[in-house]
Amino acid sequence: MATIEAYHHPASAEIATGSDGVTILAEGMALAERTLADERRQVVAFRSPGDMLCLDRGVVTTSRLRLVAVTPVTVCRVAADVVRDFGRRYASFHESLMGAACREISWLGERLLVLGRMSAQERIAIFLLEMLARTDHNGATDGGASVRLPMNREDIADYLGLNVETVSRTLSRFKRQGLIQLPKPGRAVIGDIAPLKALAPIRIEGLEGLG
Amino acid sequence: MATIEAYHHPASAEIATGSDGVTILAEGMALAERTLADERRQVVAFRSPGDMLCLDRGVVTTSRLRLVAVTPVTVCRVAADVVRDFGRRYASFHESLMGAACREISWLGERLLVLGRMSAQERIAIFLLEMLARTDHNGATDGGASVRLPMNREDIADYLGLNVETVSRTLSRFKRQGLIQLPKPGRAVIGDIAPLKALAPIRIEGLEGLG
DNA sequence: CGCACACTTGATGTAGCTCAAGCGGCGTGG
DNA sequence: CCACGCCGCTTGAGCTACATCAAGTGTGCG
């Protein structure tokens, strides 16, 4: 009996997660999106390896989120009954899941602040720092940290509640100001973290040891 | 040994919730807010009786949310060790908490869509319907459902990512268009739900049996 | 009675959106 | 191997929804 399974999805494909159980991203980058009939779209989160893809789905809740692979991805799915079993047998397991859910809630509150109250500049600065925080910087970042941006401009725009042109313009402006370089599509280089941090009015999770 | 305690707070007072345990709103209305050093503020949620006030706080996470009483409130606090005890003894208790957390996550995703992609009109329409959904409409709503709006315009504005004037103007406009009446401060009357629903591009939780 | 404060209304400003046009890299097919 | 066309990105010009600034209005409370 297979209790944990791995699945692959090509870029741009929808990722199937059961209505129950736990799905974890193993490789690649994904995004969770919510769309409206009239084409408007909100990217709720980008997901990196190690992230759970199912926290919005309760046992009964039918979530309106769609998971899409940004790059080719591998996901691990743990069947619902296995999760329940583990949860009943080891309380700490369930508590750990609960902790992940609480962190997600806390983070979503932060994102509401970004979408509700921040300027385009601030949103982009925060976005770049978030992406930096989830890249493996092998120790030092001096001399410029290279950040992978595998998603396209539209995904970034829909994540930040902006439009493509504004994202592009703001990135160009940062480049002109020497805050970043854009050597090739899908990549940004942050020479010095400090000025970006100065533009971002919130502290970014996972960026403690840097700057 | 008291395992569950009730506390009262006057309007505008901060509500103390422990860093752990479960706190439930029993009476009144509260809000969860996140503020920035420069006075910008995001109201993350309004809370009505029955709502949990602590879902953003994990066992370790230090949340940046502040809970404030909108009206005088009563809260019930269940101590952390009691929650943990119950969770370990009855798996379904923990699963129920997890379900609440998942619903919260799902709802927050929806709110991101509102703040990221919707017009002032749409935000206000959604807000009015949300508030309607949590008022006790004793059966029929024909002849006009009266909705309590105990929070002030600034709270509404900060909840919707707008400013006070835009909230006021949009409400006035709805009134002029006959969608609502504003008989006295702190109250709105929705004559017919259908036109408001038509303005709101999403389905509102808990509004199924109406309209 | 009159002050204070929440709300409304009006006039003006502007950040970001829309529309439209280039640019460039990459894959395809001749 | 090169030409072509597609598509993602950038850049520019002008517009608009909402913000900002500035008066009113009314209501409750001392």
Image: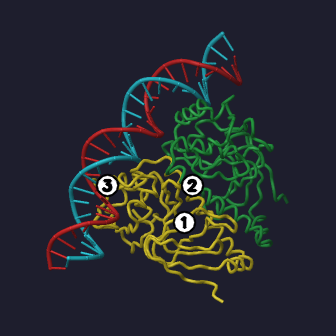
Chain colours: A yellow, B green, C cyan, D red
Whole-number angstrom distance, CA of label 2 to CA of label 3: 27 Å
Q: Is residue A73 visible?
A: yes
- Are the residues at dot 2 and dot 3 in contact (C-beta closer than 8 Å)? no
Residue D28 horizontal/vertical position (percent): 71, 24
Element under label 2?
Answer: helix
Q: Residues within 10 Å of mark 1 (few under 14, many from 20)?
A: some
Mark 1: amino acid: Arg
Residue at which label 1 appears: A66
Mark 2: amino acid: Gly
Give left or right: position of B72 versus B204.
Answer: right
Which chain is disc 3 placed on? A
| Residue at 49% across, 74% down | A49
Question: Are labels 3 and 1 assigned to the same chain?
Answer: yes
Element under label 1?
Answer: strand
Residue at which label 3 appears: A174
Give left or right: position of A5 versus B70.
Answer: left
Question: Are labels 2 and 3 assigned to the same chain?
Answer: yes
Which chain is disc 1 placed on? A
Which chain is disc 2 placed on? A
Give left or right: position of A127 versus A54.
Answer: left
Q: Quadrant of residue B179?
A: top right
Residue B77 horizontal/vertical position (percent): 76, 55
Residue at which label 2 appears: A109
Mark 3: amino acid: Phe
Q: Is residue B8 visible?
A: no
Element under label 3?
Answer: helix
Q: Along the polypeptide, which appears first: circle 1 or circle 2?
A: 1
**Which is more toward the observer, B144 or A22?**
B144
Q: Is residue A7 above or below residue B5?
A: below
Question: Are labels 1 and 2 assigned to the same chain?
Answer: yes
